[in-house]
Structures are given as C-alpha cells and as structure tokens.
Amino acid sequence: MEALLLWLGRAVGSIGLLISIVVVATRLAGKHYLAGFELLTLLQGGMAAVVGGCFLLLVALSGRGRAGGRFRD
C-alpha cells in the first residue's frame, strides 16, 4: 500500500508541477486562456494537484514504522 501511495503522490505532484509550469510559460507569452480555460483556473488546479501529491506522500510516510497498526519500539 505504501508503494502505491508513494507512486501516486509522485505522479500527482509531478502532473501538478507540469501544469503550473505550462500555465506560467503561457501567461508570460501574453495569453490569458489555454484550451478554453482561464489561466488562473488552470494554475489553481495545478497547485491543488501539487498539494494533493504532498498529502499522499505524507500519508505514505506516516504509515512507515507501523507494524499491524502499532508503532514499533
């Protein structure tokens, strides 16, 4: 389960970072819309994906060190 959460967290965070980079580059090019969406909306979606990826990684890391739901001594 931890491996899945790690993989998913990295994938979601990377996609969010990629979206944010594309949005910033498009805005610096002087455009306000991309694929029919306002760039601010896409930027918020990218940031939400990065936060979601961080949350998934946090859940994966908090599960480490537990054996059967209990902390190891």
Image (cartoon, rainbow, N blue to C red):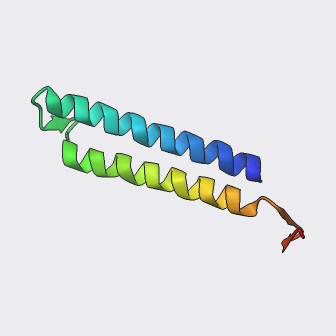
Figure disc tally: 0
Query: Is 27 placed above or below 3 here?
Result: above
Query: Is 59 placed above or below 10 here?
Result: below
Name the residue at the top extreme: 29
- In the image shown, does 73 or 30 lie closer to the viewer? 73
Name the residue at the left extreme: 30
Is 60 on the left or on the right of 31, as rendered?
A: right
Can you give x and y, in whole percent of width and height, for residue 22 in the image? 30, 31
Can you give x and y, in whole percent of width and height, for residue 59 in the image? 65, 61
- In the image shown, does 49 or 65 lie closer to the viewer? 65
Can you give x and y, in whole percent of width and height, for residue 19 in the image? 36, 37
**Which residue does the image show at 12% across and 32% down from the upper left?**
31
**Which residue does the image show at 75% across and 52% down from the upper left?**
2
Name the residue at the bottom extreme: 70
Can you give x and y, in whole percent of width and height, for residue 11 in the image? 56, 40
Q: Quadrant of the C terminus?
A: bottom right
Is 71 on the left or on the right of 4, as rendered?
A: right
Is 49 on the left or on the right of 69, as rendered?
A: left
**Which residue does the image show at 16% across and 37% down from the upper left?**
33
In terms of image quadrants, where is residue 58? bottom right
**Which residue does the image show at 44% across and 50% down from the upper left?**
49
